[in-house]
Image: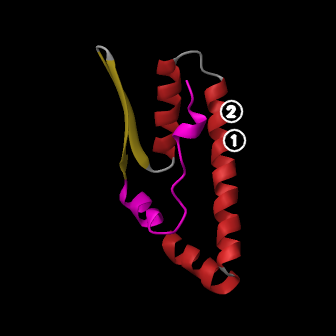
Amino acid sequence: MTVQLLKSVKNLLGENALDLLISDREKNTHDRYEKALSKTRNLEQRLEVLAEARSKEGYMAEWKKKVMNISLSKTIARSALLLQNARGFAVPSFPIFSL
């Protein structure tokens, strides 16, 4: 349904309306991440917060700590795969995740 709505926005209101919608979503997501990450004190807390936020968005995100190695991964759920087909809907996670 979401993909259909995005296609309808583009068809009925034009490419600019879709761009505005995507930009607004990116800004809201960035602001939400920044607020949540501002409350963290260390790398492990930041990874936990980011993984939790991504999971709430429909991704299956997790982080693991191994000796001398930390990895952050997300598995894209089916609904997220559909959204990836909509141009511009990949929100960059890492620019706001500076260490």
Numbered disc 1: secondary structure: helix
Residue hosting label 1: 31
Q: Indicate yes or no whether the magenta region holds residue 93.
A: yes
In-image side of 22 versus 65 (left or right): right
Q: CA distance from mark 1 to mark 2?
A: 6 Å
Q: Relative to the observer, which residue lies in front, 42 or 99?
A: 99
- Residue 91 image point, x, y percent: 54, 51
Residue flagged by tag 1: what amino acid is it? Asp
Which quarter of the figure is the C terminus placed in? top right
- Residues in magenta, as a range: 77-99
In-image side of 77 versus 86 (left or right): left
Labelled pair 1, 2 in contact (Cβ < 8 Å):
yes
Residue hosting label 2: 35
Q: Residue at x 55, y 79 (%)?
A: 7
Q: How is the image coloured?
A: secondary structure
Q: Residue at x 54, y 16 (%)?
A: 42
